[in-house]
Amino acid sequence: MVAALRVEALTKRFGAFKALDQMSFVLEQGEIHALCGENGAGKSTLIRCLSGLWPHSSYDGQIWVADQIAHFSGIKDAEKAGIAVIYQELALVPDMTVAENLFLGAEPTRWGLVQWDPIYQQASLLFRELGIELDPTQKIGELGIGQRQLVEIAKALMKKSRILLLDEPTAALTETEVETLLRILGQLKAHGVSCLYISHKLDEVLSIADRMTVIRDGCTIATLTAENASKAELIRLMVGREIDQLFPKRKSQVGGCVLQVQELTVTHPQTHEPVIKDLSFEVKAGEVLGVGGLMGAGRTELALHLFAGWGNRTHGALVFCGKSWPETDPHRSIHAGMMYVTEDRKGQGLVLDQGIGFNISLAALDQVGWFLDVDQEQTINSNFFAQLQIKAPHLETPVQALSGGNQQKVVLAKALATHPNLVILDEPTRGIDVGAKLEVYALINAMTDAGKAVILISSELPELMGISDRILVLSRGRKGGEFSASEADQEQLLEAAMCHA
Amino acid sequence: MTPISRHFSMAIGLILIWLFFAFATDNFLSPRNLTMLSIEVAVTATLALGMLLVLLPGMIDLSVGSGVGMIGGIAAVLIFRLDWSAGWSMVVGMVVGILVWTGMGALIAKQRIPSFIITLGGLLVFKGLFWKIISSETVPVVAGGQENALSILTTYYLPTWAGSLLLVLLLALMVSLQWRKRKSRARHGFPLEPLPLTWLKGLITFQACLLAVLVLNQFQGIPLALLVLLGVAAGVHVLIQHTRFGRYLYAIGGNREAALLSGVPIDRVIIGAFGALGLIVALSGYLQTAYSGASTTTIGNLMELDAIAACVIGGTSLSGGRGHVLGVLIGAVIMATLLNGMTLMAVAPETKFIARGTVLALAVWMDIRLSKS
């Protein structure tokens, strides 16, 4: 039998960086095939190639769909070939009914009028076939995330898709929803539909997948069958890399406790589901607390709760710099000596139209007075401009003209200009080159040398282990484990990150 | 494109428009008409500078035209029907302006209602209140043959000697400010504009001011309204360029999320911007009502659109984060000139609307084209 999908030596370059490097695997007909890898291993890039988002001319290697080489130049082509992507962010219209969404853009018409009866009949029929218990006349907005996901899958099948790409489909689901989803996937398999299943949750993967391929740094590492795979083996293959000497050693003096968090529970502002559960930890002056965990583990939410009062605190006692720390806003946090450096520097970190100086001093203008003292402001700006070695002609260069690494330095300079006692760095090295990374690491050491406490949120395990003194691992909002950096290894960390999954 | 070359291309456009009207009419360049034009510019530009304050953080205000009518009406009614002194009447109007606009700002910032909607509501509500206040009649700003603090806004002219003195003082101020700025920039290692260019720009500015004063003095002198505009322009410039508040306006318009995470008190800043706009709406209301001589139901009609047009022609971004006082001033001169010139040519009202709308669209289109290249 011909394989449903075959990827051969797929290589996708971004400049000199290879997001995919000679990747190969085979998805058989009626198979559930899991793709496992760390954040940044190349999973998203692969999906983009398979779904036609990156056209076929932009990568090397071949994608075979059944017995034909795919030449997708856009998403439509991939859809025509029978490939459907079920994304984490669902693409449904909330104000329309389930059936209306299923037929959106493909409504059967007679004389230009939509034929509503067949739409609802066909939708019910499809649901019955799949064993999905859903009312086609319900509005999408009234459904939970899990049910919406099922609608998405039904929509894909409606379009006669034979290959489903599921990108972290259970990330936001409750346990019963996960069970339903897995049951439906089992049924689809019986209908001959093939699924490429991408998930961090290894237990889930092991229970549903027929085979699994581990990828790392854009390369295929191994393909295992369900019988001879184990969680430990998968983790070993996913990590499998040595930490090199990228990380300068730190000799900072560890001082008193700066932030103490006890039994913190925070709920989501809209869904009111707990995002942080019963979390306790502390950070001392002069040390780096690494915070690890998978995407969606609640790391950024934790940072934003501490700094900006994100969500609702339902329980917990927090002490910052000797004072009780209530739910707050950035203005007050900065005054109290806490600063947050966002993971999204373009979206939330910088005013791109404005110059470097404007951005550096933005959070520290209280020091300059209501009527801006130009000399004082420039002194602050020039200091950090020089200290962080921002590569630009002068302080009035618009930040949008800078490279990613230099933009990151501007965001860091803005944080330092507020003279914080605690700096929360959220993915500070995302998307910057190795040279700039080294400078950021050196800067973190300089911060702790100056007696500041640092919370470092990072998805890169080597970075966490190389830079942190201690590592707190979050797993679905709970503490998955806490390690001192010297005793932790990557397997332990990954296991801790998945322990509540 | 740098602001300088943008101003340059706008100035060229303005000169072309002036040349057109100079040839198309007999008296466009007469001292009398240019004096009237300067008063009309003062009204439009003052309101546009207020609009700039809310456009910078990415907001908009559609209610200023109705506000101009309403607050002018309040002052006129207090003076003419209730016999209040003009000074106190105007103070009351300004307090009303600040309070009402602060209130709208609070609704926009705290309740997260889009400014477009709140001020669209304001446009209608204030128009209705305005007509109620003046009972849909014509209320003079002052009894016939007399004058008061409100009426002199557009009827008083500086004596020629005072106008000349003002010119000299302004010139001295500009030179010293430029000198200080240059020294400060040099001290901090900023790129400096070539000295001859600075001299050239100074010379052109000086000549323009000199010409303006000479022409205005040939009629009756510098109108008081122009001084009001000068004061508002200086105030707004200092506010947005030299205070923390102004910095925050640009930051909110440039990237609201980043501003929030940088500790910018967004709600307070937006409320403050609307409060300041309320004061300027009151001032514009006095200028416009005084210029008409009476408060009537049509005062302020469509002035919000002139104000927005002046800002946009002057390079202000409607999505926020970009805009300067000088640009807005030039934009206001263009809008006021169009109206003045077409009135002299006795163009039909319907044609005036079409022409103003076309120029607005054309100017913005040109701006987009130029800034791409």
Image (tube, coloured by chain):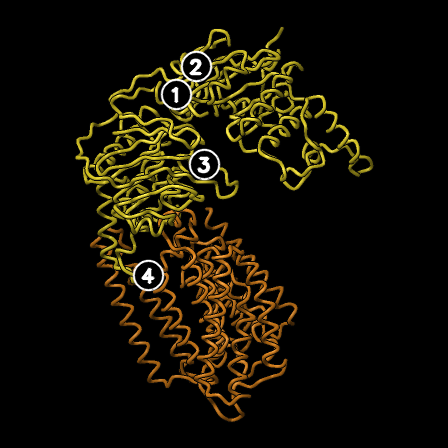
Chain colours: A yellow, B orange
Q: Which residue is disc 3 drawn over?
A: A275
- Label 4 neighbourhood size at 10 Å, few (<14), some (14-19), many (20+)? some
The reply to whether the C-beta atoms of the residues labelled 2 and 1 are less than 8 Å apart is: yes
Q: Compute the Cα span from label 4 to label 3.
A: 40 Å
Q: Which residue is disc 2 drawn over?
A: A231
Q: Answer yes or no: is residue B11 visible.
A: no
Instruction: Relative to A344, say whether B152 is above or below.
Output: below
Chain to which the residue tagged by mark 3 belongs: A
- Label 2 neighbourhood size at 10 Å, few (<14), some (14-19), many (20+)? some
Quarter of the rendering containing residue B344 = bottom right
Q: Quick one: label 2 or label 1, which is nearer the N terminus?
A: 2
Which x, y percent locates residue A156?
Answer: 64, 26
Chain to which the residue tagged by mark 4 belongs: B
Chain to which the residue tagged by mark 2 belongs: A
Amino acid on which the number 3 mark rests in the picture: Val
Residues tagged by mark 4 and mark 3 found on one chain of the structure: no
Pair 1/4: label in front: 1
Residues tagged by mark 1 and mark 4 found on one chain of the structure: no
What is the secondary structure assignment of the residue under circle 4? loop
Amino acid on which the number 1 mark rests in the picture: Glu
Residues tagged by mark 3 and mark 2 found on one chain of the structure: yes
- Label 3 neighbourhood size at 10 Å, few (<14), some (14-19), many (20+)? many
Amino acid on which the number 4 mark rests in the picture: Thr
Q: Compute the Cα span from label 2 to label 4.
A: 59 Å
Q: Answer yes or no: is residue A138 visible.
A: yes
Q: Compute the Cα span from label 3 to label 2.
A: 26 Å
Residue pictured at 32% horizontal, 76% vertical: B167
